[in-house]
Amino acid sequence: TVRLCFIMRNAAQWLDLFKRYKNIKSDYKLADHWHVSQSRISQYRSGRLKLPLAFVLEIAEECGRDPLEIIVSLAYPKAREQDKPGLSDVYWRVAVPGIMHEMRINSLPVGWRPRR
């Protein structure tokens, strides 16, 4: 089986994608959105704290992704070596539609915008 070389997103990348879709400009505003402290957002970013399932589900809904894609991508780096092939299979099964959706969104022409 041939697979594209694609690196799974980490928590910081999922947070950034969510912020982009939600048009949230800062981690301060993200913390306010989720009613948590800014230090919590920092801990989610660094991997010191796991993203709560409710946040994972909201990220998936907002970004048009399967929640399992996010869950597996966050669990994969710490998984046992013997579990990684199975996780990889699940990831690719659920991730491809979301990746294709993101590629379509990113390929849309945005038009000319004046610089400020």
Image: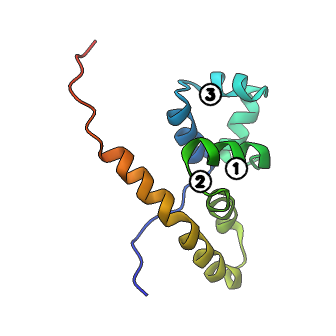
Residue placed under numbered mark 3 in the picture = 27
Q: Between marks 2 and 1, how big is the CA–CA gap? A: 8 Å
Which of pointers 1 and 3 indicates the residue nearer the eye? 3
Q: Identify the element where label 1 is drawn.
A: loop
User: Is residue 52 visible from the viewing direction of this image?
Assistant: no
Q: Are marks 2 and 1 in contact (CB under 8 Å)?
A: yes
**Is the residue under label 2 in contact with that under label 3 (CB below 8 Å)?**
no
Report x, y in % for residue 109. 25, 38
Tell me, for residue 10, which label it has, or none.
2
Q: Amino acid at mark 2?
A: Asn
The quadrant where residue 99 appears: bottom left
Q: Amino acid at mark 3?
A: Asp
Give SS at disc 3: helix
In the rendered image, which residue does mark 1 sit on?
47
- The answer to which of marks 2 and 1 sits earlier in the sequence is 2
Q: What residue is at 74 percent from the left and 47 percent from the top?
A: 51
Please provide percent x and percent y for residue 41.
Answer: 70, 35
